[in-house]
Amino acid sequence: MSAQPQSQPNQADADALNQETREWLDALSAVIQAEGGERAHQLLEDLLEHARQNSIDMPFSANTGYVNTIEPNQEARCPGNIEIEERLRAYMRWNAMAMVVKANRHNPEDGGDLGGHIGSFASLAHMFGAGFNHFWHAESENHGGDCLYIQGHVSPGVYARAYLEGRLTEEQLLHFRQEVDGKGLSSYPHPKLMPEFWQFPTVSMGLGPLMAIYQARFLKYLHARGIANTENRKVWVFCGDGEMDEVESLGAIGLAARENLDNLIFVINCNLQRLDGPVRGNGKIIQELESEFRGAGWNVIKLLWGSNWDPLLARDKDGALRKLMMETLDGDYQAFKANDGAYVRKHFFGRDPRTLEMVAHMSDDDIWNLRRGGHDPQKVYAAYHQAVHTKGQPTVLLIKTVKGFGMGKVGEGKNTVHQTKKLTDEDIKIFRDRFNIPVPDSELAKIPFYKPADDTPEMQYLHERRKALGGYLPHRRTKADESFTVPALETFKAVLDPTAEGREISTTQAYVRFLTQLLRDQALGPRVVPILVDEARTFGMEGLFRQVGIYNPAGQQYTPVDKDQVMYYREDKAGQILQEGINEAGGMSSWIAAATSYSTSNRIMVPFYVYYSMFGFQRIGDLAWAAGDMQARGFLLGGTSGRTTLNGEGLQHEDGHSHILAGTIPNCISYDPTFAHEVAVIMQHGLKRMVEKQENVFYYLTLLNENYPMPGLKAGTEEQIIKGMYLLESGAAGSKLSVNLLGSGTILRESMAARTLLAADWGVSANVWSCPSFNELGRDGQAAERWNLLHPTEKARVPFVAEQLAPHDGPVIASTDYMKSYAEQIRAFVPKGRSYTVLGTDGFGRSDFRGKLREHFEINRHYIVVAALRALADEGKLPVAKVAEAIKKYGINVDKINPLYA
């Protein structure tokens, strides 16, 4: 049978369908005219929901047209003097350019170029102007101050404003990126380098957006718990569109929407360029970002076109211009701004005869002067105004700009603009003329900074606007006004005392007991911020769920499955625990927000973030470095630490290097304690430094899940514990054969066992030293070496390691659960003439029982004994045959593969 042709709708049917469509469109237009866009939007939403309920599949689109979100008649009008603001922006552009160019015109003998960036600030000067003049509050009596995460590459523009404000001197500007002598300005925002100026480090791109989301959430947390009034504060985050490709940039936008962070505003500078080329040459980054954020639940405001596009769009009755705007690729938009008006007429408007006709009355210069939205001060103000008045949602502003705006042929819209830091005299003249800078030709070669007299309208306006907003920004508080007294060490007696006979606990349990006791302190307890990443039960902390609750701004609207249990999962609007889920980067970002609260909110908070140690510095090392830059104060706890302690978990979980990574951060104080009393002494001392003295350090402690008896604190060893080394067990007095066994963490107990074997099997006496911190011992030794180098005529300082070991004869053997380089740090400080042997866990981790793992990595008691005997043999105190005898006695396989390569 032949196939029958399908029936086609006749012309009458088609006309009827078109007529029905026109009636629907006319009805919607009538609603828009009579009741406004919001009502029309609600009707469309209701229709779509009705369609879904009737099983009509409606594909979701999170995109709107490639036009401004805010219609011209909906714009809030800027109350400022736009003409004066434009002049001030011009002066800032000039000074920022001059600062960078001057820094790169030094004699080559100075060591080459210093770098710097002009194009980034040029693209968002209008956005900064609107913020500084009208929106960004400094800390004052009536306002806690806004948090500004400033796009790192625009620092010259911020310095240029601060220079006009009188906060920075010309000498400082002349020392841009020249910091060693103490006069200079840091290349990017660095609180460590400019502690009273920059609030947040942002140039490790992607971290700023991530940290800012948790900062906004932490402000809500402080308010919910009644610790600080933060309801009027905003967190403003400036990012580049290229920066949004960093996974961290978008990694937490769901949390921001889920927790209704309406105190959070992202401003994404969409100049369509990365550092070396277009962000999406074949696509549209603004549309892509809109769908990402709108789909996540954010309020999205697009600002693409300046005011002089409004008349063209008003005449676009058939949508030809809007269609052209949507279809044009970002790579082409970049090319338009790298050319001229004639090029734009031909290659943009000329794509459609209707749009070409729309600009027939305009000159090429008129077309060239059609601005993008980010360079229109009125449009920027309106976008900001709507953002700050949005309730119940975070807001993202997608603002289209031109990278290198105003730099002319040397850089505007060019792929090379990010690296442009040198300008010729002719380029500088063009720059001056474009922005009408009052610098005569005779002075141009000097590229002088320009600052109007104090009594000029511009300068008066500049200061008046900041006075109205509470003061100058950016500004950073270095110490909190409040103070606390840390509980005395005796308060933690339950952790300091020996365990009862037959009782065993882990150092993780010791930490939980310490934390529980601290939470009971009436003054400091409420300032403790326990932070978890979904491992509370692993670390034995589930008891805190009911005790202090888990913070959730919505409370607990469900009945927890374990409600009938004593330690049930309790969420609360005023909960104290921050439970981040399976999210180490989020946990670290929350920790940073709490650890810097003394600066951002004038409130001392004490965060304790506990996590699998392997997922600490290795996973969020860049955030830990940023924490150091921000002068964070708090505790990081690496649970189930060491390469051989977390038996059964294997390569991805077993940590043998976190202390090495921690040691790379100068203000991170790190310890690998073995016993409960060491945990208590270290943490109480840390509280003293960070809370009472407000020192800019933070602590990293590794904890164990291995249970064993705790010997308790020996009076008088507290200071030695802090310094990193104390004598735990003494060898037999007067022994002819003696050694010193050093250890930390769980492997210290292998050294203790080796002491017994050495005495029983070989007649060797051993001193056992607990070394909670080889990192601190290494730093102490280096400091002593430096002192001695620079003070040759003064009494030499003795490293603490040498001071401790000096009275105790014999070779030194160190064994830890970390790579050999951890204990190798002190080799130079062992007393001269002593041999020093290091055992460690170099190589990938693997699953097995602890005993097998310690045998595999050659750090157990048997290997410690063999190392001690070999050291004595090398000194001629034992026949080398004794070493071979020990190897045989303990069944050591000398032919197995080196664990580093196994």
Image (spheres, rainbow, N blue to C red):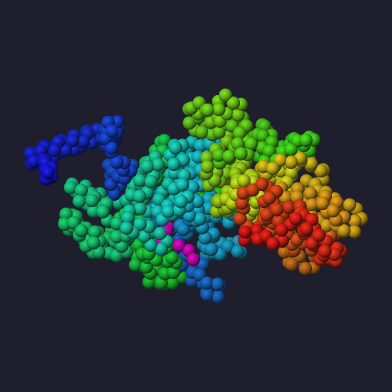
**Along the horizontal axis of the image, is 109 left or right of 277?**
right
Compared across the picture, whether 102 is left or right of 298 comes to: right
Examine the image and state in which quarter residue 679 appears.
top right
The residue depicted at 75 percent of the width and 48 percent of the height is 749
* Magenta region: 115-121
The image shows residue 754 at horizontal and vertical percentages of 79, 52
Residue 116 part of the magenta-drawn span: yes
Q: Is residue 718 left or right of residue 380?
A: right
Q: Is residue 658 above or below residue 831?
A: above
Q: Is residue 359 left or right of residue 274?
A: left
Seen in the picture, residue 573 relative to 625 is either above or below; the reply is: above
- Quadrant the C terminus occupies: bottom right
Q: Residue at x 42, y 69 (%)?
A: 423
The residue nearer to you, when weighing 286 against 164, is 286
Q: Nearer the viewer, residue 307 or 392?
A: 392
Residue 632, visible in the rendered structure: no
The x and y percentages for residue 592 are 56, 46
